[in-house]
Structures are given as structure tokens and as C-alpha cells.
Image: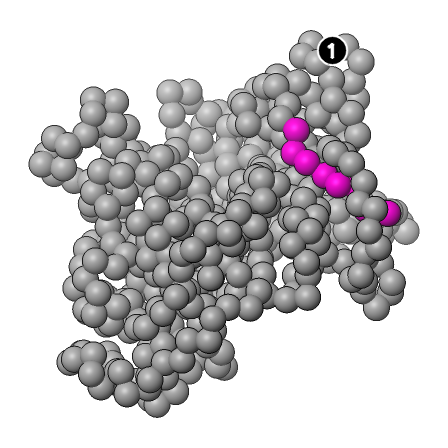
Amino acid sequence: MFIELALAPIEEGWLIGPNYILPPGCHFRLGTEVLARSNSKIATAAGTYEEEWRWTAASGIPRVFPITQHYTEEEIHLAESLIAAALIVAGEEETSRMETTYVGPVSRVSEDNRRNFTLSFASAEKKFIKKVADIWSKDSNITAQCSYKSKAFAQGHVNEVRKLEPQANKIRIEVEITLVVNQGKFDHQDEFEAMIGGSSVIIRVREGAGGFRMQAETFGYHMPSIVCERDTPQAEIVKALLGRSGPIDNVDERELENANLDMNCVRQLNDKQKHTLVHWLNPGVGRVHYTQAPPGTGKTKIAATCIAAILRSEPESAVLASATSNLPVTKLVVESARAEVDVNMVAFFSGTARVRYGEQIEQLEEYLLEAKLRGEEYKNSLETSEVKEVDQYLKLVRPQPRHSRERAVGEILMRTDFHRVAFATTFMSAAITGAHKKTTHLILDETTQIPFCTVMHLICHMPALKCVLLT
């Protein structure tokens, strides 16, 4: 039997355990509970699903994904609730992060290297080592502190996780990390030097940037089902992703010849790539396009050409180009610049990305957020509080990018000076609240790496969307 689920709000300050909640200040607690925030919610039972569930995996276990055209509206509604619950569980990794906290000294990779260190975990329990490997994954953000009550004196990321030879019947793994001292009004250099000298420290993985809670709200409030009821291109796109049948809407391949696109990037396309482009230029009643090809065959190039062509064909269009990680996003920006996209483009990158991929991101200097904010003319259109936030961003973005608040300032830019071509990772795109209400075209690169929930969440928050290209 399935249990019908709903999201229940929890007041800020309460403690959320695996299967219980506690009021603020409660003395009876384990210490692994999660502190509820202003918008915290938990999955709760709201009733039972009495019908026989028709969809099972080969093992006989009920499945709710992928959603196909054979699902009834009631089944989709239940699947949305269960997906929301799964996302809530995925977002509650605090217990695992606490259990895999490292306490002890770290080793320098080499005598002259003051940034890279190694630490190791050892246990006779395979389950614990697997949990460590899952939490301490490559590129995970980490912090270092002297005690549980002190502020973090350094932060960084995981470079590599390596399996070592067992010792004394214990499984061992080694983690290579990068740590840099925190800058700000407090001087943490002495603590950093003590760590280098061999003092014991506490290092833990920071909360991930999966955006699970935002996505859980999208499915928990049944936004896909609600959008499907509308008579809009966005609704047809959501229906397609849910396996719903839509109107038959053929495209005349000769339309590209009539589009009057005298562009060098279009002339360089082969016949199959032109086939993708002509469909992209004709959104019809709302379309989802999918193009697949081996690596190195020009998928990013066709994506950039699609951006340039739609803006030439429909100047009022607005495009968001995204991918799940930062390097594909930088490639999209570079290819779009080569395709001579003739509008002002902007690219958003988190502070962590600027540290991790600084060399690649610096090459995009004219398209970065900071380049769009310089100049007194732009500041004249902002409120006093917004001017302060922009000034603080410009002050920190180079020396302390992790503290620069790219998302908050990006939201200010897109609200006051909307850029019709934007680039960002899928998480950054979703985190810049309300920035894509005018977006008409969406390009998702390396789609096989993007979770279905993330794609659906983005699309449900783009009411003006007419066309999606998945590459």
C-alpha cells in the first residue's frame, strides 16, 4: 500500500530528527537533529492510496519514475508527492555529514605546498567507508575549525578520494583536499599555521548545493500537474516531459531557407545540425528538442548557433543556457561568443566555481556579472540597499569570491537590467529567484547528467517558455 504524502511546514528553530521533531530548547535530543529554517518542511502522511499500483520494477518493487504516457492523472499526482518526499530525504544529509566529520591532524602533500593536504579514514565497517566516499566526493565543499564551537578558519574542496591497502583488518581511504585561510574581519592565520604544524583540526563537508528543497516544493505543491492544465507553450513542454500526448505539429524543413539568416555560424552547420536548427526556430505550440551525438561532434556549437539564430529571428526572445557543472557552461559562453550572439550576454558563477575553475572563468571576463555592474550609470537605477550590496560584491568578488553573494546580486541585475542571454549551472539558475520569468528558450547541455527533477523544476518556473533544446 502507498501512503499519500504532503509537505508540512516546520517552524524555525525546531529540531528535525529521522522520524520525529522537537521544540526549541528541548533537552531530550541525540545531537544529530537538523535545525529547521524559515522555510523547512517535512514529508508527512496525508492518507492512503487505496488503488492497486500498476507500475513495478523487474524485482517487483513499486516504481514511480520514469513517468510515462500510461500514468493516469491520479497516478502522476501521487508520483509527484513521492518524488517530493525522496527529495526531502536527499536534502537531509546533515546526519551523514556529522558522522563522517574528520577529527585529527592533516598531512601536507609536499613541504612547499601550503594549500593541498591529505587525511584518511579507516574502519572495519564497509557501510561507514561507503558513507564517507559518498559524502566526501570530488569537488565537495569543506570547512576546517579548531573546535565545534569556534568559527571556521579555512575552507576549500575535495580534490580526490583514493582507496588504500587494508591495514589491521580495516578498510582505508585517503582524501586529498585543498584548504585556504578565511579572510574577513577575524584573523585566522594563526589557526591555519597551527594546522600546518600538525595540530588536530575538525574538517567537515558543507551542505551540498543540490537545491533539493526547492525542487521538493515544486513537486510537493504539484506544480507540474498545475502547469499542465494551462493553455500555454510551457504546458505543452511539461506534458512532453511527463509523457503526455500533445498536438501533431510538423515543421517544413524549407523554413530555414526563408528565415533570412545570413550568418556564418549557420553556414557552417551540416545537414543534421540544420535539421535541429529549423525545428528550434519554429516553437509551434511548445517544443522539446533532443539532439544526441558522440563527444567532439559539435553539440555545443549547434547550441550556440541556436542562441544566435533565435535572437536574429526573434529579437525579443530570451535564452538561458545551462548545464549541471561549470566547465560545460564556460564552453557554452565561448562558443556563443564565436557565434557572434549580437546581444549583451551575462554568465553567473558561484564563488566556489571561481576558486576551482578560476583560470577558465577569467577568460570570460567581459561576460561575467562583475563586468555588468561597473559604472555609476547602472547604480543610479538601484535602491540604496542594492547599491551597497553591489559595492560589497565588487569589493569581494576577486579576493574573496566565496563571500561575494553572486546569486543575490545576480537577482538584482536580472530584475533591474534583464539580459536576454544568460549562462549558469542548473543550480545557480534555480537559485537566482525570479530571474527567468521572461525566458522563452532554454538550452540544457550534457542533459544525461542533469536529474529529471532539476529539469522539471526549472521549466515549471519559466512561464514564458516556448522551446527547450536538450543536448
As for residue 278 lying within the magenta part, the answer is no
Quarter holding the C terminus is bottom left
Quarter of the image for residue 420 reads: bottom left
- 328 and 143: which is toward the camera: 328
- Name which residue lies at 46% across and 25% down: 188
- Name which residue lies at 84% across and 58% down: 61
Q: Residues within 10 Å of mark 1 (few under 14, many from 20)?
A: few
Q: Main secondary structure of the magenta part?
A: strand
Which x, y percent locates residue 194?
A: 55, 28
Q: Which residue is mark 1?
A: 26
Q: Is residue 441 visible?
A: yes
Q: How is the image coloured?
A: one colour
Q: Amino acid at mark 1?
A: Cys
Which x, y percent locates residue 195?
A: 57, 32
Q: Which residues are magenta?
A: 1-8
Which x, y percent locates residue 384?
A: 20, 22
Which x, y percent locates residue 469?
A: 42, 68
